[in-house]
Image: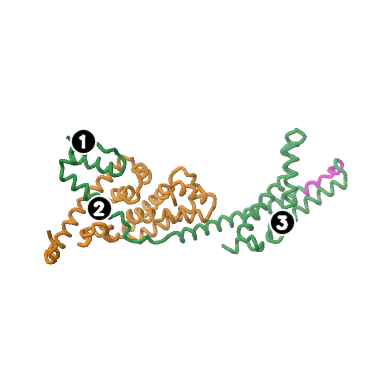
Chain colours: A green, B orange
Amino acid sequence: MIDCDTARRHLGAVRDREARPDPTVDEHLCGCTGCRTWLTDVDEVTRALSLRAATPPTFVDVALELWDARVRRTDHIHHAAGRILLGVAALGCLIVGVLIAADSAGHTHIGVTAHREVIILEVALALGLACAAARPSVFLAGILPILGIVAVVNLAVSVVNVASGNSTLATEIAHLPFVLGLIGAFLVHRVDAVIAPEDTTTRPVAHA
Amino acid sequence: MRDHRDLEAMALRAARGDRHAFGVVCATIEPDVWRYCRSVLRDHTSAEDATQETFARIVTAIRRYRGDAPVRTWALVIARRVCSEAFRRRDRTDVPVDQQHHVHLHPATHLHRSHLSSAEQDSLLDELTPDDRTAFVLTQLLGFGYAEAADIADVPIGTIRSRVHRARSQLAELWADATADADELVSPKRSVGGRTP
């Protein structure tokens, strides 16, 4: 024989599909009016409470507004980070260009004309990156393809050189500004493309 | 939304930045979050604040959702934390809550036995302790299993089992008393109408 409390616990668990029916409990239920009444009351009150008496207020619009605000905030951070990277890359190229120019023996390895052109290329890229950092809406689209090709080719050559032992990582670090600039350019470009695919002059700052 | 797997798929899309999927997820879990907050905090204003705060956290947290737990469970764990913080703030500031301690069911309730007004629902649930009420709401009104409810409430499954049983027994008792009161109120009218057996 089981007591009423044990039977009711089990009956509740069966109602919740957390236990299987037990013949002992069923037998108790047949002979116990109190438990039968209890079970009826439980079913009735649960059913009555289950019906939604009032429509809850809607929070979906609020959630979507918060979502949009978060996206704008994230885009703004990415945009700012991209511009900073472009600025750092510009500075890096300029420093590399100055270092090459200051190396009086540099032209003996590659010739005077090639030496001068390397310096010009570094300074030109530094200027282009600086302009893109300052006014991405105007200059970024122009510099992105050139920067992309320069960065990828330099990176590939650096990897081959380091892997074959013809160069060291310390030497190849001179190409790092291109890679940083490319990452920065992609960050800024991605945000601009998402926010204003038809209007390249729009920046996330305007949405903040 | 066909089943929980669809909802999980939507949540994963939202985690990757899909705004439409996020809206669908919010619309689906909104009633559960609201009802949970309402049942735990008991007053409408606090429940609204808690629900909004829950969604504010979900906006940030959805990026980290990887489908390890069902979305509804995951969302209600966040709601539980928000409600716990609201409780602590309330304890500090001693803000009174809406309280309707005595259960008054309208006589018509007994006749229909299928519909309770919002106030009557709140009134019945308010009689339970917060822990018992939460366990009851999670398992009986929101349809969670004991294991999921235990995850949400952050207690062992045996505790949920005990709380559900206690809540159920108390509600059955209240229901029996309230409907008996309603019987007394309705009986004279029935007698006048000649419909009493």
Which residues make up the magenta segment?
Answer: A97-108
Horizontally, is B140 left or right of A3 in the view? Answer: right
The picture places residue B96, in percent across and down from the top left corner, at: 29, 60
Is label 1 or label 3 in front?
1
Would residue B34 be seen by someone viewing this image from the given angle? yes
In terms of depth relative to the viewer, which is nearer, B180 or A108?
A: B180
Residue at x-position 78% and y-position 52%: A123
The picture places residue A159, in percent across and down from the top left corner, at: 72, 38
Q: Can you tell which mark lies on residue A130?
A: 3
Residue reaching furthest to the top: A165
Q: Chain of mark 3?
A: A
* Amino acid on which the number 2 mark rests in the picture: Val
The picture places residue A18, in percent across and down from the top left corner, at: 31, 40
Instruction: Tell me, yes or no, whether dots 1 and 2 are on the same chain.
Output: yes
Which residue is identified by label 1? A24
Q: Which quarter of the figure is the N terminus of chain A placed in?
A: top left
Q: How many marks?
A: 3
Horizontally, is A132 left or right of B65 in the view? Answer: right
Is label 2 or label 3 in front?
2
